[in-house]
Image (cartoon, grey):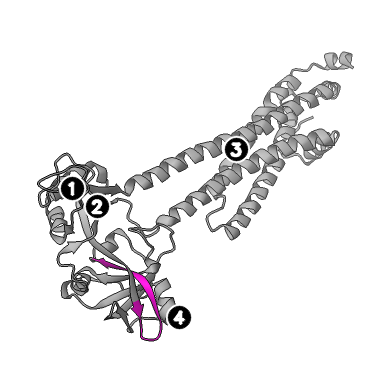
Amino acid sequence: MKITFFDIENWREIGATLSRNKTRTMLTAFGIFWGTAMLAMLLGGEKGLERKLRSNFDGFATNFAMVDPGRRSMSYQGFNKGSSWIMTTHDAENLRRGIPEISAVAECEEINDVNVTNGLKSTTAYIRGISPEYFDVFLPDLYYGRFINETDEAASHKVCVLGKQISEKIYGTESPVGKYVSLGGIYYRVVGMAGQTSEVQIRGSKVDEQVLLPMSTMRRSFNLGDNIGGLMILFRDKVSPTSLQSRVERILRTRHPIHPDDHNAVFFFDISEQFAMVDHLFDGVTLLALFVGVSSLVAGIIGVGNIMWVIVKERTNEIGIRRAIGAKPADIVTQILSEGVALTFVSGVAGISFATAVLAVASRTVGPGFDLTFANAMAIVVTFLILGTAAGFVPAIKAMKIKPIEAINDR
């Protein structure tokens, strides 16, 4: 009497055996189902949450720092504690020349609540002057036209890029490109409309709420001279901005009366540390998801092992008769393992299917990215098949060792 893993009669018998005690089988199957579903949902959900959070940084370089003038925390050369200082375009040039690890230095200046009008409709906006390097650090979404370029900066062109929200308040849904708007009484030609999908605000507001001007144009229009509000410094790959903070501060002190030990006078914010924090956060979330999911799955597999023990105990007489009429030990092992694997496989696939459906709903309601990758699904399948086989192995060995005469006497 030879039993093979792919024998149809063998699988019919498995079904009959598992259906003898439906309550016990269903409870065990639910344990595997829920453990597998938990693992699949946690893995897919964790990736979705990570993608959702990282989307807030879309368009941003990951290796830059914001540098602004702060207030002195120490009196120095006639300047009192608490006094401020002003950064200039010369600071940007000195940093470009003095630190080879710097890839780009973007100059910025902001003015709040400037009146914006096309003669028919008006609103107030956040005006930001930028140098072309700004787009090396942060690249917004461009809906119409183009961004400010080096030619605009060099020639101080009176051009601007409207934020999406500002453009819609003045021009509605039509393209503003080629039209003119007045900013504080001075007219500029609109060359583009931009916005951002992320919620992260750089220097106080989103691009949607701003009007972007060439830095040189803004300095002339608003009589700023060489003054700028701050810098956005992009560092070369694999260079930590924080490791160069002291060099940045030292170069700034060469042109401004700041005490050598005053580390509060220069505001230095390393954005790369925020990205590293997100990476560490999701490393921990991934480990937690794996721990919880695998623990739930293992609990279900232990249930499979228990039910196999009970089945072997209940079928001791039947196994003995099989041995007596010619069944080999390997046939008995195959039979018991098949029952454990069948229960595990059906319950596990049902769990993955349920998790996939839940993640699909999450993708439609929360946002894309909540899905179970094929690689993760296959890894879960292989895991529960291995564990299911292992759970049935010890009971199978016990069944293999049953001797016909002992089984008959046990009856």
- Residue 248, labelled with which disc? 1
Disc ID at residue 67: 2
Q: Is residue 125 magenta?
A: yes
Q: Mark 2 near mark 1, Cβ–Cβ under 8 Å?
A: yes
Secondary structure type for disc 2:
strand
Residue at numbered disc 4: 172
| Comes first in the chain, label 2 or label 1 | 2
Question: Horizontal and vertical percent for residue 199?
Answer: 44, 59
- Where in the figure is residue 335, as x and y percent of width and height? 75, 31
Q: Tell me the mark number nearer the camera, choosing from 4 and 3.
A: 4
Q: How far apart are marks 1 and 3 (CA)?
A: 47 Å
Q: In which quarter of the image is the N terminus?
A: top right
For the residues marked 4 and 3, what is the alpha-carbon distance in whole angstroms? Answer: 50 Å
Residue under circle 3?
Answer: 293
13 up-or-down from 177: above or below? above
The residues colored magenta run 116-130
- The kind of residue on which mark 2 rests is Val
Compare residues 372 and 75 and report the one nearer the observer. Answer: 75
Q: Is residue 354 above or below residue 326?
A: below
Q: Is the magenta stretch mostly helix, strand or loop?
A: strand
Three-letter code for the amino acid on which mark 3 is drawn: Gly
Q: Quadrant of the C terminus?
A: top right
Check disc 4 and give the amino acid type.
Gly
Mark closer to the chain start, 4 or 3: 4
In this picture, is 154 found above or below 309? below
Query: Which numbered mark, 2 or 3, is in the foreground of this view?
Result: 2
Which of the 4 quarters of the picture holds residue 197? Answer: bottom left
Dot 1, crowdedness within 10 Å: few (<14), some or many (≥20)? many
Separation of residues labelled 2 and 1 (CA atoms):
9 Å
Tag 3 or tag 2, which sits nearer the N-term? 2
